[in-house]
Image (cartoon, rainbow, N blue to C red):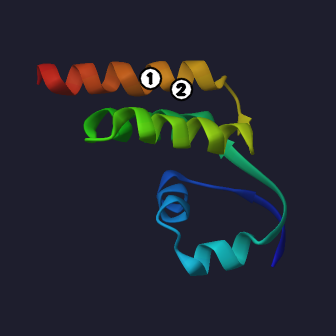
Amino acid sequence: MNGKYLLDTNIIISIFAKDPQIHNRLANAEEVFIPCIAIGELCFGAYKSLKIEENLARIDEFAINNTVLACDTDTAKKYGHIKNQLKEKG
């Protein structure tokens, strides 16, 4: 299948997990778009993980290789960090 795709956070997580069904569907994509909020959600998850720097680097690489829509990547990363700080405070 080819064309343009707008990915949500769950699909991106599946890509990171190397889900073959997702990879097959996106193999011939003309262009992939990611909402900035999905970057923020991924960063939030990265800050909760045991491999924070590794996961943030993976998110950065993914964002660089695709088109992030609306606000910029830095804003989305700040969103993830702030959301994590708020969660830690309860």
Residue 41, can we see it? no
Check contact, mark 1 vs mark 2: CB within 8 A. yes
Q: Is residue 23 left or right of residue 66?
A: left
- Given the image, on which type of amino acid does mark 1 rest? Tyr
Q: Position of residue 46 (x, y in %)?
A: 37, 38
Under mark 2, the amino acid is Ala
Instruction: Tell me: residue 32, above or below residue 60.
Output: below
How many residues crowd around disc 2 within 10 Å: few (fewer than 14), some, or many (20 or more)? many
| Kind of element beneath mark 1 | helix
Q: Say if residue 73 shows up in the picture.
A: yes
Residue 63 figure quarter: top right
Does 39 sit left or right of 45 as displayed? right
Examine the image and state in which quarter residue 69 appears.
top right
Give the residue pinned by disc 2: 76
Q: Position of residue 18 (x, y in %)?
A: 53, 69
Above or below for 38 versus 4: above
Q: Residue at x 43, y 39 (%)?
A: 54
Question: Which residue: 13% across, 19% down?
Answer: 89
Residue depicted at x 11% and y 24%:
90
Q: Is residue 65 above or below residue 3?
A: above
Residue, disc 1: 79
Near-viewer residue (11 or 65):
65
Q: Which corner quadrant holds the N terminus?
A: bottom right
Residue 11's spot in the image, x, y percent? 54, 61
Q: Residue at x 52, y 36 (%)?
A: 57
The quadrant where residue 72 appears? top right
Left of 20 or right of it: where is 78? left
Label 2: state its secondary structure: helix
As drawn, 11 above or below 46: below
Task: Give the percent coordinates (x, y) of residue 68.
Answer: 70, 37
- Dot 1, how many residues are within 10 Å of its Cα: few (below 14), some (14-19), or many (20+)? some
